Each structure stands twice: as C-alpha cells, then as structure tokens.
Amino acid sequence: MNKSKASSNLIYVILVLIVLVWTLLPIYWTVTAAFKSRIEVVAWPPTFIPEKPTLNWFIEVWYDRPNINYYTNSILAMIGSTIIALALGIPAAYGCARYTFKGRQDVLFTILTFRFLPPATVVMPLYLIGRTFHLIDTTLFLSILYGGMNIPIITWVMLSYFREIPVELEESYQIDGYTRFEAFRRVTFPLARPGMVAISMLVMAFSFGEFLFASILTTSPVAKTLPVSIAEYMGGEWGYMWNQMAVLTTYGLIPLIIIFFLVRKNLVRGLTFGAVR
Amino acid sequence: MRKLNPGLLMSIPTLLFLFFWFFFPFLYNIYASMHYWTLYRPDIQFIGAENFIEVLTSIDFRNAAFASFFYTIICFAVELPLGLGIAVLLSREFKGVGIARVIVAIPILMIPIGTSIMWKLLTMPKLGLLQYFSEVLGFGVIDFYGNFWLASLLILLIDAWQWTPFFAIVLLAALVSLPREPYEAAKVDGASPFMVFTKITLPSIQPVMVIVSILRVLDLLKLADPIFVVTKGGSGTETLSAYIWRVAFKPLDIGYGGAVAVLYWILMFVLANILVRRFKSVIQ
Amino acid sequence: MAELVIENVSKKFMGKTVLDNLSLTIHDKLFTTIFGNAGAGKTTLLRIIAGVEKPDKGKIYLNGKDITTFLPKDRNIAMVYQSFALYPHMTVYDNIANPLRARKMTKSQIDEKVNQISKSLGIHELLSRYPRELSGGQAQRVAIARSLVRDADVYLLDEPLTNLDYKIREGMREELKKMCKDFSATLVYASPDPLDALAMADRVAVMSDGKLLQYGPTKDVYYTPNDITVATIFGTPPINVLNAYAKEMDGHLYLETPLFKADVTKHKEKLSPNKEYKVGIRPHHLAISKRKVEVEMISFLAELHLTHVVGAETICYARSNGEEITIHVPYIYRMEGLERVYIYFNPEHLLVFDKDTGLRVT
C-alpha cells in the first residue's frame, strides 16, 4: 500500500514539475533575453544563462523610442476601460438580477451578443468614426472601446453573483433604516466584491495587452500603447530587435503582477462565475 | 406618466453605449459592403451584392474561414482537457501549492503580442531554444514558418500556453469549492478514483466548464494576434480576422472589407446562438 | 399607540392572486398571529406591511397615517426574516447595531443599547462573532435582537421558529410571549403552525389562498371557528369531521353520524330536519375509557390501532365503523396491541357545519 502511494506521489510531483517548467520556460527565456547582449540573444547554440548580463536594454528602451509614453498610455487605457466597463456593466447586472421586467431576457441576450463581435469587423468603421470625432490617437477612445468590449462579460459574471446574494439581506438593511442604494453599497457590493475583482483582473489583462484596435486607432506617442510598440520592433533595418521586445514584455508583466498580488485572496473566491452547485 | 421599471432604467445606458460604439459602426459595414468604396477614391458606387459574391468566391476567404474554424477546434480540444488536468493537479493541498497556482496563472497576464514574440524567439531557425533541442535530439531544423501544419502547431503552442491557465484557474476555483460530502459517501461505497471523477466531479463542475468553454470558443474564432506576429498570415494560417486586416485595411477597401465583416459576423452569431441554445439548460 | 390597519390589500404575482382584498386591523401591544398554510399569503402580507413589496391595490395605515407609499426606512417597522437575513460580512455587534447606526445615534448610545438587548437575549458573549459561526438558535436571537434594539411601532416576524430544532422551539415560544409583554410591543407573527398561535397569540388571523377567513381572539377562533376550513386548518392534530344527518324524532332533533347520535334539540332554530350537515369534534375534546361512560357524554366504541407519544401527551388513532378518529389525551397512554375502547365527549364541544357552505351553525 505504501509503495504504490509513494510511486503515485512521485508521478504527481513529476507532473506538477512538468507543468511548472512548461509555464516558466518561455518566461524565463524572455527575461534572460532582456539581459543578454544583442549578439548573445541570437547566438547559436542558445545560451541558457546570460554570459554577460547587462541592464543596458532596460534603460535604453526608455530612450530609443517614446516607450515611457506607450507604457503610461497602456496603463491609462487599462484603468479607464475597467472603470467604464464596471460603471456600465454593474448597473445592468444589478438591474436584471433584482428586477423583473418584460424584455429582461432580451436585454441580457443583447448585451451578451456584443461579445460575439470580432473586433476586426468594426475596426474600419471605428476608424472612420474616430476621424470624424477627432478621437483618433486618444487614450479616451481606447478606454471607451476596451470598456465596451468588456461590458458583456462583466454583466454576465456580476449577474450571477448578484443572484447569489439573497434579496432579503438588502431588504433587511432597508427596513433597518437605509435607502435601497445604501443597501447595495453596504451589503450587496461588499459581498459581490470577490467576483468583481476576479473579473476585473481579466478585463485589465485584456485592455493592457490589446493589439488590434491600438495598432490602427492610434498614430503617435500621444496614445499608442505598449503592445504596438513591441510589435514595431519586429521589422526595420536591424531585423528583429529581440532584446527590446523582451524587455518591454517583461516590463509589461509588472503592473498586472502587482495587482494580482494585491487581490489574490479575493480571486479564488470570485472565480466560479457563481455557477458551481 | 407610467413609471419605468428601475431594472430597465439601469440597463438602458449600457445598451445605448453598446449600440452606439459597436452596433452602429457595424451598420456602417452593411452599408459599405454594398458599395464600391475605398478610401483612396472619393466616389462611392452602389454595387449591390457584388462584394459579397466576390468574397464568397474568393479562395482566400474560404481558407481564412477554414483556418478560423480549424484553430478554434484544435486549440479548444487541447486547452480544455489540459486545463482540467492542471486544475485537478493543483486542487490538492501540498507544500507550495499556493506558489504553483500563482505561477500557472501568469501566462494570462502576459501581453499576447509579447507571448507570440517569445515563442517566435524560441522557434526561429538557427536561433530558437526549441530548434536547438530538436537538433540535439536529431530532428534537424523544424520549419515552423513554411509548413502549414507546423505553423499551426506553433499557433497552437502560443494559444495553449497563454490560455490554458484560463481554464485551469477557473476550473480550479470550481473544484476547490465543491462540497466534500459526496466524496466521503463515495469512499464509503468503495468507488474507484476514476468513477469518482467521472460521476461526481465532472457533473458538479459542468456548468462552469460550459460557460468557460463557450467564452473561449468565441474568443478563438476571433484569433488574430499570433497570426500577425508569427506568420503574418503566411502558409495558410490566415484567420478571418487577419484576412480582414489584409484585405480591408491595407488597401483601405471598405466595401470589400465590409462584406467580409458582415459574413464573419453572421458566422459568429449563428454559431454563438447554436452554442448558447444547446447549453441553455446548463447555464442557469 | 401603534395601530396598523390593512385596507383592501390585493397583490398578484405573475397572474396568480396572492392576496385577495384583505382587510385587517392589528391592535396595539397585542401579539397577533397570521396563520395559514404555505402559499396562503402570510409572507407577502408581512412584506407589504414592511414596505419591501407594494400592493397592487389597497392601503396600509399606521396610527392613522397612510404609509402605503412610504419607503421601508420611513415606516418604523421592524422585521425578522425566516432565514434570519444576518449580514454575513458584519459581526453580531454590527448586525444588531445597524438600525441604530441608521438613526445616527452616538457610539455610546449604540453601545449601551446593543449590550442591553444582547444581555437580555443571552447572546452577549457572541457580539464579536460572525454569523457563519452561530448555531440556528443563536442566529435567530441575533435577528430578533436586531429588531428589538430599536423602538419600532410594529414588529413583524416571519416564521422565525421554522428553522429551529423542535426542542428550542418550545422554549422560544415562552420567550417571545414574555418579550411581547416586557417590551409592550405590537407583534405580528406569521406561522403555519397552529401551536404557535395557540401558545402565544392574543389574536389570530386565519388566511387561506390570500383571503382572510377569520380574525379574532385566539380562543374564539379556535373554539368557534366560522367555517369548516378554519376549523380544519387551525388545529393540530386536525379536527375530526363526520357526515351527519338531521332527523326529527319524537319531538327531538337529532344529528346522526356513523358513530353516534347527538340530541341537538337545543339548537332547533338553527338546524333544519332532513338536511345533511358536517360535524366536527376536536381531538383534545375526546377522551378514552375502557368502560362505557354514562352521564351526559356521548360515547361510542372504537378500535385503537396506533398511539404516538408527544412529550407528556399522547395522540391516539382509532377506527370505528369505517371512520378514522384522532384523540389527543393529556397523559401518556401506552397501548397493548389493538384495543377496543370507548371514546366519549361532551356534546357541547360538537361543532356543526352546513354541508355545502361550511359555515358553522352551533
């Protein structure tokens, strides 16, 4: 009995290690590429540990192109879009969760339909609209679009979370002497927060890394984002500038990892979309 | 004046917002698709369904549609079981499981373009680590970029690496929140681990699996980022999104692009409807 | 003074009528029970009184003021939910203090009141705990504390004892009645259990299918139910009902049932001969004897086939002439196999109902 348990444990450990290596290897490779010299990064055979690690790229990347702007723009778009998505997604979710009205199913279905929309199909018209309203090359435009693209998922997820919270709690709070809004703020919202945090993380990851809209709808460091910048290092006279791309990708991880760590506890509780029986 | 239901009131701004920024532009496509319209020329001519015919008869369009479906299917077929497997692995409490869970979640947070670049670096001929391993193992250079199947494999690798954790984390959360009683009862009944898994675990997390699967499938049909970076649509890897880019954006041919967009969207809509209807009972 | 008037209130949910033109006056400082089976409309009525539900038609008045359109927070009414509705993310202290905080009382005032009420309910040690750590009985006391801590005009309780253990339930009945007296509170208590009303309430309102069937002092409703529905649902074990036929014989009027004949000449004016009636006798008005009983009691033979001891009393099930009879005796009766016994009762306790309308005649 012990022997088989030990061997199954061993298999288990091996499997977990394989998963971890599979996950970490590309990241490791990128991060080390950021530390390698220009020649070493394309060396053959590839070096596992950078021979002469340098911080050069980490600094140069801020100077050779306006990456500071790009980075900031990405962060701003991320925050802006999350605010918009929550500001519009939560009321719709709450309204449909707590009230019944004719056409409620249709409203929900319509909101959901927007998730089927491939961004590539509306990029052209949005370009034209943007040109008309002088929204091209503005972070606002990106925030609006990213926010809009995420409203369906926020509505969907928050809807199921609100449904899970008994109405009686809100009613009892009102009977205690508060308005409906205060009941939402002090009871429903805190209880739904884990779900909100979880889905917001996904929204932020999406907005920060979005490429298609950013590449077409922005033209200058005023609003261009980090993903676009990374892609731009792909061509040109020097060929692929691996080092810079690696550095920027590494820098790109930081904001999201920080946020991730801040909200870890809320995340696991919030991730079942309220659907587990 | 009759009072509006507050729930409806709360939903209206959201609907208006979505209609204005996404539906209205899409109507633009419908309008444009029926005209000959490029941004290079100021004149627009109505040509009815001509664009549509051109699209439907274009081999590239059909290839792109095929590519979109193909990638959706293979990526999903890999990511779901893999994600489930990882979720099961990480659902047990062992020393360091917390760190393991965090590590596994990181790919979701990576910039997708960055991910694609990373994998490109790993697989470039005479450059990439994987090529090195392949040479050492005696396989020689793997032509990821000239061969449809290998290129598709690369796309699969990129997408799976980035998005399997999505399945894994969500399913993990579901597994972890399952009540313990059915398992204890099964133990008393003497059920094998396999039976426990298939008869108890899987049915319990089925709603979550369905939701997360539908989400991922819909997103896969829009696949674009890896194509742009890795193969630029070469070797037959061009998906519908990449196709629109090439055919509508580069030459600024809005008419043709509009037609593709309309057809693309119809495809998505029909499929999404089928999926949702089929699984409606499972989701709430 | 807290007088609650419910006037012609009607409510429909998805086409189904839940409350049908209900009118009721709840009197000050009395313990009133709203009694009815599941689906009778009790909870909906309470919710409308509290203000979390609006009636389709009708009005609610509190102390003469029309509060039908008032928000719950402006009604000065407290409610205890069947599920207790404790806020899971707040401590017991914060839960109880919540209504006081809404009224912007000072911290010391709140502190004093919370401590006072928690002591009198025996939950003082639980103040820093969270709802998920509490047992059913504890949670219920916290819910009650939260409503009592404030000075409300009316206290509504929606089946608060349903989720509790049987043992605790009996103790709580005593406590609730005591609370009503101690706090001079006006209590409205919804319950499907007749024992709740019988043990605690001053007044009972019997509801069925959204309609009010009878309202009055508990004893009156119990001993003189208006119709057969009230008699049947308000009482446990349920009242024994028999078919009866009125016959005139030698100048006397008798009601003949399959089991016995009752002389009802006294009530000649209210009954018509050659008419069919239903008669009812409550289980606890019946008694068992091994020998035939004389005196002015009506008795008949029956075969006892099951006894069920409840506490210090027994419910006995007997069969006679094809009819099932339930008897409730205030002592422990142990059966030795099937027994033939005499069942007897005082004819004064016999309730006569019109066969078709169900209205009580005597």
Image: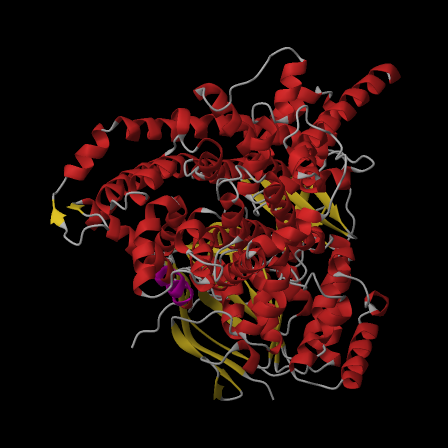
Residue C141's x, y, as percent?
75, 66
Q: Residue furthest front?
A: A237
Choose top left, top right, bottom left or bottom right for residue A189.
bottom right
Nearer-the-camera pick, A86 or C186? A86
**Magenta residues (range):** B7-16
> Split into 4 quadrants, where in the image is the N terminus of chain C?
bottom right
The prevailing secondary structure element of the residues shown in magenta is helix
Choose top left, top right, bottom left or bottom right for residue B21.
bottom left
User: Which residue shows up at 61% across the image and 48% down it?
Assistant: A248
Q: Is residue B205 left or right of residue A90?
A: right
Nearer-the-camera pick, A16 or B47? B47
User: In this rendering, is residue C232 above or below C211?
Assistant: above
User: In this rendering, is residue B20 above or below C118?
Assistant: above
Residue A125's x, y, as percent?
30, 53
Nearer-the-camera pick, C109 or C241? C109
User: In this rendering, is residue B42 above or below B171?
Assistant: below
- Total numbered circles: 0
User: Which residue shows up at 79% across the image and 53% down it?
Assistant: C312
Choose top left, top right, bottom left or bottom right for residue A263.
bottom right
**Which colour scheme appears in the figure?**
secondary structure
Q: Is residue C228 magenta?
A: no
Q: Is residue B58 visible?
A: yes
Q: Residue furthest right?
A: A2
Q: Is residue B175 visible?
A: no
Residue A187's x, y, as percent?
62, 66
Residue A274's x, y, as percent?
57, 47
Q: Is residue A37 left or right of residue B45?
A: right
User: In this rendering, is residue A236 above or below A165?
Assistant: above
User: Which residue shows up at 71% across the image and 32% down it?
Assistant: A20
Q: Is residue B15 magenta?
A: yes
Q: Residue furthest top?
A: B138
Nearer-the-camera pick, C289 or A195? A195
